[in-house]
Amino acid sequence: MSDRVGGIVLAAGAGRRYGMAKALVSYQGQLFVERAARVLVDAGCSPVVVVLGASADEVRARADLTGVSIVDNPEWATGMGSSLRAGLAALRNDEVAAVILPVDTPGVTDAAVRRITAMAAADALVRATYAGVPGHPVLLGRAHWAGVSELAAGDAGARPYLRSHPPVDVPCEDVASGADVDRPEDLPA
């Protein structure tokens, strides 16, 4: 097995609280989906998989996602869990781990991703924290993918699995912000 770390951008949601698909939110001259994919690419993740659902055709038309793989999640309306399963299923068979990054965390940087991927191993579970609060990115070692996929339902993503398999928490507040953008007023200045 290689030591390659894949990256997954979860970008399938409709963004009901935001009022539009968050993949299409423009921030600092980029769409959220472009920004998230670029963070993973710049951190050395390969391949990078972007999971689309709501507004997938518009995202394809507007976003520059050159160099990444796009996967459609036909079950996107069931929640983030189905997108996480679709992203993990789309990776090749030679990654040792995968970094998970929701599209609505524009403050996450490639430095935070590199800090997390420095701990990559097949049995690793690693999570960024911000002032002690768990956040993203999250690194899932390959040995955990089946268990994560089995429990990923609704909008919980990997949380149910991580409750019974505690990850290593890695402080990242010095290099990133893990704040989620759920509404327009949550956008950083």
Image (cartoon, rainbow, N blue to C red):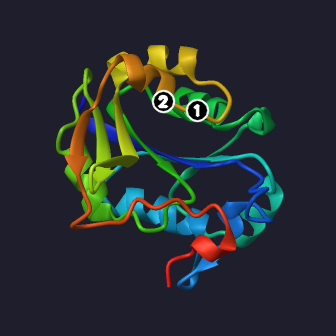
Among the 4 quarters of the image, the one containing residue 32 = bottom right
Instruction: Specify the label residue 156 is tagged with.
Output: 1
- The image shows residue 93, relative to residue 99, as above or below, that is above
In this image, 54 relative to 103: left or right? right
Instruction: Specify the label residue 44 is tagged with.
Output: none
- The residue sitting at 25% across, 57% down in the picture is 172
In this image, 84 relative to 163: left or right? right
Residue 65 in view, yes or no: no
Q: Secondary structure at mark 2?
A: helix
**x%, y% of residue 155?**
64, 36
Residue 161 in view, yes or no: yes
Q: What kind of residue is marked 1? A: Ala
Q: Residues within 10 Å of mark 2 (few under 14, many from 20)?
A: some
- Where the N terminus falls, by quadrant? top left
- The image shows residue 138, relative to residue 105, as above or below, that is above
Q: What kind of residue is marked 2? A: Arg
Marks 2 and 1 in Cβ contact (< 8 Å):
yes
In this image, 13 relative to 159: left or right? right
**x%, y% of residue 76?**
75, 38
Q: Which residue is mark 2?
A: 159
Q: Secondary structure at mark 1?
A: loop
Q: Residues within 10 Å of mark 1 (few under 14, many from 20)?
A: some
- The residue sitting at 48% across, 67% down in the picture is 106
- The residue sitting at 58% across, 64% down in the picture is 181
Q: Which residue is at the front of the view, 2 or 122?
A: 122
Q: How many marks?
A: 2
